[in-house]
Amino acid sequence: MSIREQIEKDFIEAFKAKEEKVKSVLGMIKAALKNKEIEIQKELSNDDVMDVLSKEAKKRKESAQAYKDGGRKDLADQEISEYEVLKKYLPEELSEDAVRDIVKTTISETGATSPADMGKVIGAVMSKVKNQADGGLVSKLVKEELNK
C-alpha cells in the first residue's frame, strides 16, 4: 500500500470514528497533495508524496516554535499535535550522530576543505538523508565540521 493510499484509508477511518483532529490534518494533507499534483501536472510518486509530507511537517514545527516564542502555548500545542499526526507517515528521523557520520563521509567524498564549500556539502548530504534529517541540523553539523 502506498503512502497516499494509507493516508486515504486513515482519513476515512478518522471520519467514521469522528476523530476531528486527525480528520482535519489528513484533509489538509490530501489538499496539499492534490495541489502539488496540479502544480506538476502528473500523478505524484512516493518521493513526491514524501516531499510534501516533509514540507508540511516542517511548517508545523516552525509554526509551533514561532507560537512558543510569541507566548501562545495553546496554538503551539495545536501545531505540535498536528505534527504528531504527520509524523506517522514520515520515515524515522536519523540521530544527530548518524547525520554527523554522513556529513563527515560527504566532506571527504566531495573534497571540501573550507566553509566556502558548505553549499556543495549540504546539497550532497540532503540528497543522502532525504526527508530523514532537518536541514537546519545538517547545516549546523556541516558548519561545525568544516570549521574544525
Image (tube, grey):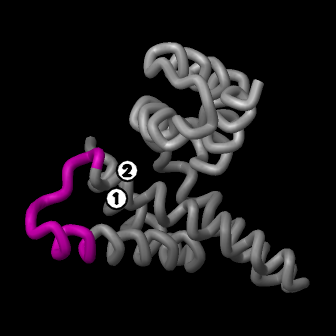
Answer above or below: position of 12 versus 73. above
| 143 or 42: nearer the viewer | 143
Q: CA distance from mark 2 to mark 1?
A: 17 Å
Quarter of the image for residue 98 reads: top right
Q: Which residue is mark 1?
A: 9
In the image, which residues are magenta?
34-47
The residue positioned 57% from the left and 48% from the top of the image is: 135
Q: Amino acid at mark 1?
A: Lys
The crowd level at tag 2 (other Cα within 10 Å; few <14, some 14-19, many 20+) is: many
Q: Is residue 39 magenta?
A: yes
Quarter of the image for residue 65 reads: bottom right
Rendering coords of residue 23 (x, y %): 48, 74
Q: Which residue is mark 2?
A: 50
Residue 16: tell me if it is visible: no
Residue 109: tell me if it is visible: yes
Nearest-to-viewer mark from 2 and 1: 2
Which is nearer the N-term, disc 2 or disc 1? 1
Q: Amino acid at mark 2?
A: Met
The residue positioned 47% from the left and 49% from the top of the image is: 89
Count of marks, rendered view = 2
| 52 or 119: nearer the viewer | 119
Quarter of the image for residue 26 reads: bottom left
Looking at the image, the residue that sits furthest to the right is 71
Q: Determine whether, in the image, residue 69 is placed left or right of residue 92.
A: right
Most prominent secondary structure in the magenta stretch?
helix
